[in-house]
Amino acid sequence: MNISFYDLSVWVFPVLIAITFHEAAHAFVADRLGDDTASQLGRVSFNPFRHIDPFGTVILPAMLLFAHSPFLFGYAKPVPVNFRKLNNPRLDMVWVALAGPVTNIVLALIAALAIHALSWAPAASARWFLDNIWNAIRLNAALAVFNMMPIPPLDGGRVAVGLLPRALAMPLARLEPFGMLILIGLLILLPLAGSQFGLNLDVISAILRTLTGHVIQAVLFLTGNA
């Protein structure tokens, strides 16, 4: 796969903005709800270097891209949250978790609204701006959908732990140390294993792509681009 400088140039800003605002939103909401752990570590910040994880943000997505993975994903440095310091630990955990995906949806809406301003861009750079905008819409929609999977430590998993009855929440919470392994198994290893036997086991990726498509269509509709 040949990746040009132009390809990189239309992805770097959407990626940095999406992950930075996602993680900063977690830190900001946690701080407002009583836990200053992330704030003390400087994570309530729009400086992307405070949130980038060298492996999860750069190396892993690049490996999946070059391996032609059916679904790309990565992660930033998790925002540390001491849930016991929150004013209402179980409910506030839900708000802290939701802050990231909600922020990504807001960023997608802002990017889609920016399409209407393209007529003011210089003709020579209009295509570059448009590609950045489309990548921002797609990336933020994908991040919102992916992070809402009900598997800890993803945001959706923490929302589920906060809302489910304790009898169901506790076993789910205990999966958190194995969450990334479960995701790698579902999104990468299972489809690869199925391909060896002529089976299409790329079910989770297909569901994520479908849901992401619906979110993108909703964003375009709400911003008058559909």
Image (tube, rainbow, N blue to C red):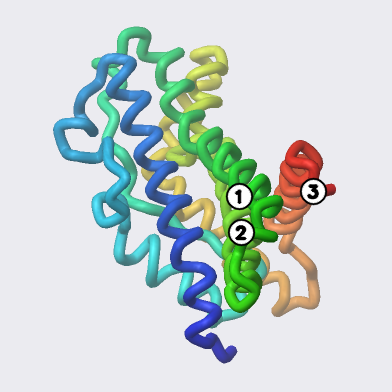
Residue found at x 79% / y 42%: 224
Left or right placement of residue 30 versus residue 149 in this view = left
**Looking at the rendering, in which quadrant would you find the N terminus?**
bottom right
- The disc, 2 or 1, on the residue closer to the chain's N-terminal end is 1
Label 3 sits on what residue type? Answer: Asn
Residue 224 visible in the snapshot = yes
Which image quarter: residue 84? top left
The image shows residue 2 at horizontal and vertical percentages of 57, 91
Above or below, comparing residue 58 to residue 82 in the picture:
below
- The disc, 3 or 2, on the residue closer to the chain's N-terminal end is 2
Q: Residues within 10 Å of mark 2 (few under 14, many from 20)?
A: many
Residue to which mark 1 is pinned: 111
Residue found at x 73% / y 48%: 216
Pointer 3 and pointer 1: residues touching (CB < 8 Å)?
no
Which image quarter: residue 16? bottom left
Label 1 sits on what residue type? Answer: Ala
What's the distance in space between the residues labelled 2 and 1, CA to CA? Answer: 5 Å
Residue 225, numbered label: 3
Residue found at x 49% / y 24%: 161
Between 122 and 211, the residue placed more toward the observer is 122
Left or right placement of residue 44 versus residue 59 in this view = left
The image shows residue 95 at horizontal and vertical percentages of 46, 21
Label 2 sits on what residue type? Answer: Ile
The image shows residue 154 at horizontal and vertical percentages of 48, 40
Q: Outermost residue, right direction?
A: 226
Residue to which mark 2 is pinned: 133
Between 171 and 110, the residue placed more toward the observer is 110
Pointer 2 and pointer 1: residues touching (CB < 8 Å)?
yes
Between 160 and 26, the residue placed more toward the observer is 26
